[in-house]
Image: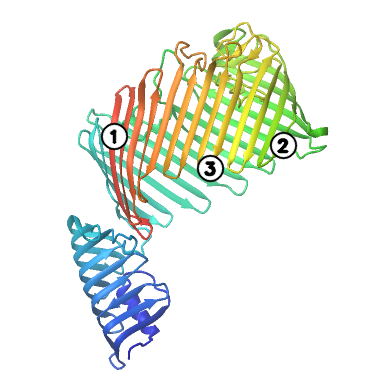
Amino acid sequence: MKYVKLSWLMCMITTNAFCLGVNIDEAKTITSDKIYYNVKSEEMKASGNTEMVNASGQRVKLNELSLSNKAANVSASDIELWLGSHVYIKADKITRDGDETIAKYANFTACEGCDAYGTAWNIHARTIIHDNQEKMLYFHNASFWVADDNIPIFWLPYYEMPDPSVKYKTGFLSPSFGSTNGMGTQINIPFYINISDRHDLTTTLSYLTKENPLFQAEHRLNLKRSEFRTKGSFTHNKAGKNRWHLYNNDVIELGENARSTIYIARTSDKTYLQKYGFYDYQPYLDSGAKLELFGQTSYAVADAHIFQELRAPSKNQQIASGNILPNIRGTYQTDPFWHETFLSFSGDVLAISGDSADSQRMIGEARIISPWTLWWGNRLTLSAASRYDVYNFRKTAIYEGNGINGSYTGVKSRFLPSGYVEWGLPLYSAESDWTYIIEPKARLTIMKHNDKDSIFAVDNDSAGRFLSDTTLFSTNRYAGYDVWENGNFVDYGARWAAFKGQHNIEVFLGQTYDFKTDKEDFYENGFRNGFSDYVGRVAYSRNYFQISSRFRVDRKKKNLNHMENSIYLGEGKTYLTFGHIWDTQPIDIYSDSSKDTHELVTGAGLKLTKRINIKGSIIYNMYEHLVQRHSGGIFYEHPCYYLSLEYQRDNAILEDYVGNTTFQFKFGMSIDGKHY
């Protein structure tokens, strides 16, 4: 009989003989030139062209089939198995004995039909054994071929891998290779340990030709309402020193309105992260814990920070010191109680402990905000605030009056009332396909004037007060809580914008005037005789092109004092980026005023083909004519495997770290979307 439908028999055959551990849906059909079934001996034979297809789409083609003893023993010849969309096995003969299915002179691939140019890779083996109990494939006398079986790559006497039904399996992962000018060639051999579906561990042994081995580990645990992540490394180098690093980040959800976080970032010394490639160019490491509470209109957080400094001391810049233990702050906003008028309350408790000095502060503020929309579209916002600060200092350097008190111990407090009136008039116009908006804006801020009691603690906050387009129309233009504006000022400016389809244009220009002019300012801030420099921004975007510029222009000389530019052109893997910063004035009181900040950052990517792309980046110090860092790489992404070759040069010099050139090669396989 040419076509015989035996669903129950199909299920027995595919489940027990040929599916190599893949879960089978309800069997669909079996067709063969001839099918014989002996009811008495429960034996079945099929001859000629035989094909079996199940409901999930998995199918088997074969020539001769013999099945007996309720499918405990099976043999077949000229077998073709499709175990997934691209997972394919072809063998001269397949037999089964208990939990083992044995394929002779077999060809295995997880890339069948995924490439129009042919099968990307195949494994030819004299014997492939599938253990249905262990869910493993074992290859004996195996050779790896690519390019549709045209190029042999390597031969292995023995190789094993999980079968396609396995989501997680303990075993070795694909190695990666690297090379540095300081430590020679590096070979990374990762080993994956599966503990459960939500719990696993990856350990990596790194062999270096010019340095002692490096050990790495990464632990992951996901629970119903929390996740835990830990990774670190350790080495005992040839100089006899133990060097290591530890990163940890645990997030625990405590219901709908609370969350806790524990984070650790520590290293043995300042240069270890750079030298061994774990460095993300961070200036310091932050360890601590945080508890957050959420409400409909409120938020509170308590956190602690212990810092580890990675920057080298400089004669031009003081490195901040001290830890924050603890920092507690919260905000609460009422519902509007009259014409959109509402109240907000905030509090902040901070303790900073250093090597020989410490300080504690408590800040509380209440603010009322009342926005109004008046005739002809005028917008008016009124606000008043009352703030009270209490500080306890012990051997703390503070700014007091026009000088620096380097060792103050005692309690200080201050009452700081303030308020502002802000006006704006957005004007709208539509002509042809363009939409135009122009909005003049002004804000008058009134603040209590403290002549000789600014009590700014050096280690508490940043001292920066550079005026920019982002700090204009702010209540306090300083970077932290402790520096007070100390007087009245008015901000004014105008914004113009135009829109048409994908076209977006924006221009902003503004300035501020301080009614009190300090004769001596302890750092350069762009103010002259009360008037500030002009600040602004220009931006344009359309489809795959974006450009923006933020600037500060000297009011008298009309020359640029500060400029930040960024350009992005492209989409996806083909792009060009450009970033530039230039500043002719010092950043803070510790900076060397004789040096300008002049830095250029560029990056580019090019999609050469559907699967091949290259990318690179450069950071260039234009003041010192020095390439600080540059990198590049070529990447190949295939549906069934991936590989990359990357290069990086870092010219940083810090203690025992003197630049580094690194090459790294990565290769991995993918089976039905899972990487190995």
Q: Residue at x 44, y 34 (%)?
A: 577
Q: Is residue 458 above or below residue 373?
A: above
Drawn side of residue 431 relative to residue 661, left or right: right
- Residue picked out by circle 1: 662
Q: Residues within 10 Å of mark 3 (few under 14, many from 20)?
A: few
Q: Are marks 1 and 3 in contact (CB under 8 Å)?
A: no
Drawn side of residue 170 relative to residue 492, left or right: left
Label 2: state its secondary structure: strand
Label 1: state its secondary structure: strand
Q: Are marks 3 and 2 in contact (CB under 8 Å)?
A: no
Q: Is residue 512 visible?
A: yes
Q: Residue at x 24, y 63 (%)?
A: 138
- Residue picked out by circle 3: 543
- Extreme-front residue of the structure: 432
Q: Which numbered marker is on residue 429?
A: 2
Of badges 1 and 3, nearer the viewer stands 3
Image location (x, y in percent) of residue 107 = 23, 66
- Earlier along the polypeptide chain: callout 1 or callout 3? 3
